[in-house]
Image (tube, helix red, strand yellow):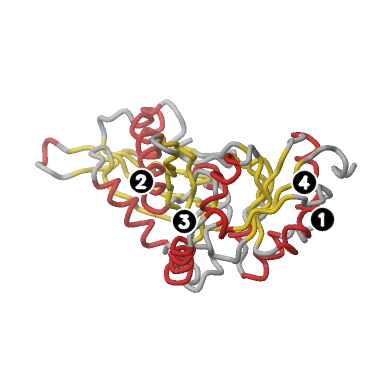
């Protein structure tokens, strides 16, 4: 891979101790210095979008996070170099906790030297820095300067809070961009775990509100790092357009689990095991149609699958 040294790339370091608000101010600092690419915690960011890399905040330990931020993995470093070769940016802002960290990132990626440096105390007051430190220490929160939607696939199962950032310049109020607040695994709060039963309760509540669903007879889920898998069996009530109902159920479950905890559903499979019809000659008693008859009435197999191809349920 050809080095970017001598290529005219302007490399600027944005330096400050951990938890002092660098990521919170990164977009504004970049804009004020006419820089449209950022490197922050393993990510290459351009215009509020992720160009390459994986967030170091996803690492299970603090040591792992530091290694990811420094691109110690050869594959990650190569992918980042390829992104620079492809995009050919004119300037990049590298965030780091020290001059040495910024210089090392530039060296590993072959984009140095770092000829300009901006320090957090130059763009933030001591009061603002102290407030940022307090939030980091007391709440374990970290800011990533991209929208939550950009991070959703990387942070499945984490709590994500979008944060719209505005800044006043004279009499004008500027919209700087959207950032995301996360609590990474290595924060002192530990890892947030959403139990299968909590997911079941959300799904059951949705089904209780759907008049076409008689009951859920089986529910299985697997919430792994790559996302959530759901598999369930339902008994349905006769007289409803089942394909329409099941698609609505899928969409509602995907939307509510996303709203509930930012969960990304990789696959949702619903098996319809039978139709329940009201027996008018015996008051309120009910009987179930056999599965082959039920499938004939649906004119499709009695199974509906969704959210294949690794995409979130809500698109």
Q: Which residue is mark 4?
A: 79
Q: Position of residue 176 (x, y in %)?
A: 49, 40
User: What is the CA distance from the residue labelled 1 to the residue labelled 3?
Assistant: 41 Å
- In the image, which is nearer the foreground, mark 1 or mark 2? 1
User: What is the CA distance from the residue labelled 2 to the residue labelled 3?
Assistant: 16 Å
Among numbered discs 1 and 4, the one appearing first in the sequence: 4
* Number of marks: 4
Q: Which residue is mark 1?
A: 108
Residue at x-position 31% and y-position 52%: 204
Q: For the residue labelled by badge 4, is the local secondary structure a helix, a strand or a loop?
A: helix
The dot on residue 256 is 2
User: What is the CA distance from the residue labelled 1 to the residue labelled 2?
Assistant: 42 Å
Q: For the residue labelled by badge 3, is the local secondary structure a helix, a strand or a loop?
A: strand
Query: Is disc 1 in contact with disc 3, using a CB cutoff of under 8 Å?
Result: no
User: Who is closer to the viewer here, 15 or 182?
Assistant: 15
Q: Is residue 213 above or below residue 240?
A: below
Q: Position of residue 121 (x, y in %)?
A: 56, 60
Q: Which residue is mark 3?
A: 221
Q: Residues within 10 Å of mark 4 (few under 14, many from 20)?
A: some
Q: Quadrant of the N terminus?
A: top right
- In the image, which is nearer the foreground, mark 1 or mark 3? 1
Residue 192 in view here: no
Among numbered discs 2 and 3, the one appearing first in the sequence: 3
């Amino acid at each position: 891979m050809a080095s970017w040294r001598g290529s005219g790339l302007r490399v600027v370091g944005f330096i400050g101790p951990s938890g002092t608000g660098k990521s919170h101010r990164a977009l504004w600092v970049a804009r004020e210095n006419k820089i449209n690419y950022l490197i922050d915690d393993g990510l290459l960011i351009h215009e509020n979008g992720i160009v390459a890399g994986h967030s170091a905040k996803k690492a299970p330990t603090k040591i792992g996070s530091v290694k990811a931020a420094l691109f110690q993995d050869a594959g990650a470093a190569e992918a980042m170099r390829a992104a620079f070769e492809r995009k050919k940016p004119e300037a990049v802002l590298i965030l780091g906790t020290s001059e040495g960290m910024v210089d090392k990132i530039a060296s590993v990626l072959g984009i140095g030297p770092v000829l300009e440096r901006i320090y957090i105390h130059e763009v933030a007051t001591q009061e603002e820095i102290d407030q940022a430190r307090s939030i980091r220490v007391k709440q374990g929160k970290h800011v990533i300067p991209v929208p939550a939607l950009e991070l959703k696939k990387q942070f499945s199962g984490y709590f994500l809070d979008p944060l719209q950032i505005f800044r006043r310049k004279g009499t004008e109020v500027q919209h700087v961009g959207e950032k995301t607040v996360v609590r990474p695994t290595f924060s002192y709060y530990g890892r947030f775990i959403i139990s299968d039963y909590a997911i079941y309760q959300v799904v059951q509540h949705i089904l209780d509100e759907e008049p076409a669903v008689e009951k859920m007879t089986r529910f299985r889920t697997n919430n792994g790092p790559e996302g959530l898998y759901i598999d369930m069996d339902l008994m349905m009530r006769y007289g409803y357009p089942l394909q329409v109902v099941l698609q609505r159920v899928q969409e509602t479950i995907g939307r509510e689990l996303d709203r509930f905890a930012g969960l990304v559903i990789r696959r949702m499979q619903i098996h319809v095991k039978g139709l329940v019809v009201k027996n008018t000659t015996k008051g309120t008693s009910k009987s179930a149609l056999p599965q082959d008859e039920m499938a004939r009435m649906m004119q499709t197999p009695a199974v509906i699958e969704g959210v294949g191809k690794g995409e979130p349920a809500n698109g």
